[in-house]
Amino acid sequence: MQEVLDKDKNLASIEHRSERDQQVFERKQNEFELNKQHLERERDQVQEKLEGSKGKLSEVQDELMHHRLESGREQALQTQQIEFQNRKISELQMTLDEGQRQFELKLKSYRQEIFEDAQA
């Protein structure tokens, strides 16, 4: 009879431990699910931030490329204007040199005429 009571007691103890272990398991499982949901939300937020940052990066890169192209165009235009002004300066210098040469020839001719008139 004592054996039966001991076995019943032992069985009750095992059942109690089993119920307690089951409760611990369920509590741990609930904690796991809550942590999983929390981490999934954090992952989604980080993913959204990453996508936003990628979009901003793309915009900044596009803007930088636009500025580079615009700067290149402006530089090319300025170079072209400088070349045009240099050509114009060269042409004006040639015109001035030619005008001065003609002036000196006329002055020489005029002096020659005056000299010839003075001797005659």
Image (spheres, rainbow, N blue to C red):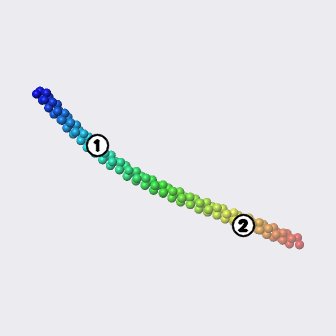
Q: Residue at x 79, y 68 (%)?
A: 105
In front here: 45 or 89?
45
In front here: 59 or 87?
59
Residue 106: name its quadrant.
Answer: bottom right
Q: How many marks?
A: 2
The answer to whether residue 6 is seen in the rendering is yes
Whether label 1 touches label 2, CB < 8 Å: no
> In the image, residue 104 lies at what x, y percent?
78, 66
Q: Which mark, by number, is residue 50?
A: none
Q: Residue at x 64, y 64 (%)?
A: 84
The answer to whether residue 107 is seen in the rendering is no
> In the image, residue 88 lies at what x, y percent?
67, 65
- The amino acid sitting under disc 1 is Phe
Taking the image as shown, residue 51 lies to the left or right of residue 120, namely: left
Vertical comparison of 3 with 59: above or below: above
Considering the numbered disc 1 on the image, is that residue within a helix, a strand or a loop?
Answer: helix
* Mark 1 nearby-residue class (10 Å; few <14, some 14–19, many ≥20): few
Vertical comparison of 4 with 86: above or below: above
In the rendered image, which residue does mark 1 sit on?
32
Residue 79: name its quadrant.
Answer: bottom right
- Name the image quarter holding the C terminus: bottom right
Q: Residue at x 30, y 44 (%)?
A: 35
Q: Residue at x 48, y 57 (%)?
A: 62
Disc with the residue nearer the chain's start (1 vs 2): 1
- The amino acid sitting under disc 2 is Thr
In front here: 119 or 80?
80
In the rendered image, which residue does mark 2 sit on?
95
Considering the numbered disc 2 on the image, is that residue within a helix, a strand or a loop?
Answer: helix
Taking the image as shown, residue 103 lies to the left or right of residue 56, namely: right
